[in-house]
Amino acid sequence: WRSSADARRIHFAEEWNEVQHLKIMESLGGDSRWIDRFLGRHAAIFYFVLLNHVWLVSPSFAYNFSELIEFHAVDTYGEFVDANAELLRTLPAPQEAIDYYRGD
């Protein structure tokens, strides 16, 4: 169950990517209502605690479950882009996205 240095680098890159996506979605207004912020933060805490308990029983199941959540997130991002394609084309790129994709 020990992670190699390469696996840790991959996990860090995945986590950094998730943080950047969150910042981009927030800059597009995803955190404008307090209830969205409240539910999002509390759901994240619940998910973290749940996944840690699952990991204690089965690390591989916890990892696979996390992957399923990521696949769902990709689908959700795709649906968001499809549903808002016209609007997104009219908006300037968020500064967070510019910084991230330019490597700043």
Image (tube, grey):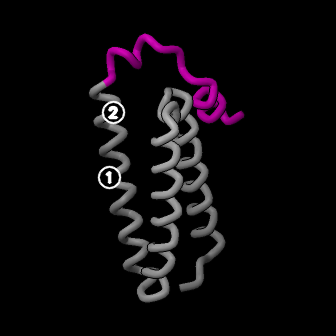
Using the numbered discs, state the Cα–Cα distance from disc 2 to disc 1 in whole angstroms. 12 Å
- Residue 25 in the image: above or below residue 3: above
Which residue is nearer to you in this view: 11 or 70? 70
Q: Quadrant of residue 24?
A: top right
- Which residue is under mark 1? 72
Please state the horizontal and vertical placement of residue 62, each as a whole percent of the image: 42, 75
Q: Residue furthest top?
A: 90
Which residue is nearer to you in this view: 11 or 90? 90
Q: Quadrant of residue 70?
A: bottom left
Q: Please give left or right for residue 102 compared with residue 86 in the image.
A: right
The secondary element bearing badge 1 is classed as helix
Between discs 2 and 1, the one toward the N terminus: 1
> Magenta includes 59?
no
What secondary structure prevails in the magenta region?
helix
Other-residue count near label 1 (Cα within 10 Å), few / some / many at <14 / 14–19 / ≥20: few
Magenta segment boundaries in residue numbering: 84-104
At 54% from the left and 20% from the top, the residue drawn is 93
At 52% from the left and 43% from the top, the residue drawn is 37
Q: Residue furthest bottom?
A: 57
Quadrant where the C terminus sits is: top right
At 46% from the left and 73% from the top, the residue drawn is 51
Please state the horizontal and vertical placement of residue 7, each as a whole percent of the image: 57, 69
> Magenta includes 88?
yes
- Which residue is under mark 2? 80
Which residue is nearer to you in this view: 90 or 32? 32
Tell me the amino acid under the disc marked 2: Phe
At 49% from the left and 86% from the top, the residue drawn is 56
Please state the horizontal and vertical placement of residue 72, each as a whole percent of the image: 32, 52
Q: Please give left or right for residue 41 compared with residue 63 in the image.
A: right
